[in-house]
Image (tube, helix red, strand yellow):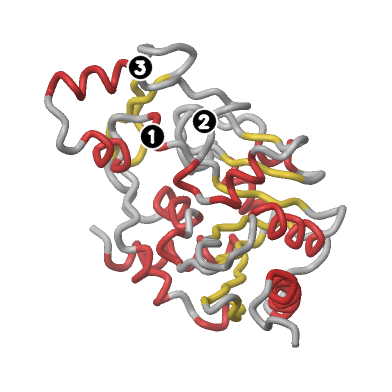
Amino acid sequence: MADATGPQNLLHKLRNTLAEVGVRPGSTLMVHSSLGGTGLGATAVRDVLLRAVGPDGTLVVPAFTPENSDTSREYRRMVEGMTEQERAEFRAGVLPFEQGATPCPTMGALAECVRSTPGALRSAHPQTSFAGLGPRAAELLTGHDPHCHLGEGSPMARLYEADARILLLRVGFEVCSAFHLAEYRMTPPPSRRTYRCVVEEKGNWIEYEDLDLYDGDFGEIGARVPRDLYEEGEWAGSRVVHIGVRDAVDAASRIMSGYRR
């Protein structure tokens, strides 16, 4: 008897789930995912997603690199417990962002798989880049303003304009990066703060200002997104959500403007 939870069965179920929630050929699809516990390799899942959007579709993933910034939450976690000297040595050793080479481990196995696939393109932001495969990747990812994380000068705004779709694959709205574009568009806008990261060579730390981005309430915002705006399914024991970037951003902007101050 075939193993109902075996790799081929899970991949078959994934193909069915994608169809059920409305992923269609020709789509531009931005995917946030968690494959932990499925037993599947990221390459197999990537290939199912590419087949789902077809040769005319484009697959996009966040390829963020918060490890490259001493102003990030992830960096602070890495140096927690170090002495002042250890922190200074660690900071001095941080590698600069390289568009074609720097991995994105905190984004998960699928994101790193897409980023490192031959032919993939990546936007140039040293902290919040995106990677993509497909005919629209260059159009969407080229020209990422290095001083704009996820606002009007980023691929996120282009994904909005392109009427792209979002797939939350075994993750919740708490990681829905499109909600950050809503922060740029909310009324009143959030305050700004300074960010730092390393570019070009070790020790070359640069500073710039951008919105003070906050994702601590994204799960709550997602719970308030009207249910008729997205399709929902299940795969490998976890939730799958398919929603338009425009619907997600517009709804989140209204929600944020109503209660964030």
Mark 2 or 1, closer to the camera: 1
Q: Using the numbered discs, state the Cα–Cα distance from disc 2 to disc 3 in whole angstroms.
A: 14 Å
x and y, in percent, of residue 52 in the image: 79, 64
Q: Using the numbered discs, state the Cα–Cα distance from disc 2 to disc 1 in whole angstroms.
A: 13 Å
Q: Nearer the viewer, residue 42 or 159?
A: 42
- Looking at marks 2 and 1 on the same chain, the residue that comes earlier in the sequence is marked by 1
Which residue was labeled with disc 2? 125
Element type at mark 3: strand
Q: Nearer the viewer, residue 112 or 139?
A: 112
In the figure, is residue 206 to the left or right of 42? Answer: left
Element type at mark 2: loop
Which residue was labeled with disc 1? 67
The quadrant holding residue 17 is bottom right
Q: Are marks 1 and 3 in contact (CB under 8 Å)?
A: no
Which residue was labeled with disc 3? 205
The quadrant holding residue 116 is top right
- Looking at marks 1 and 3 on the same chain, the residue that comes earlier in the sequence is marked by 1
Residue type at the position of mark 2: His
Residue at 23% over, 58% down? 261
Residue type at the position of mark 1: Glu
Neighbour class for label 3 at 10 Å: few (<14), some, many (≥20)?
some
Residue type at the position of mark 3: Trp
Q: Using the numbered discs, state the Cα–Cα distance from disc 1 to disc 3 in whole angstroms.
A: 13 Å
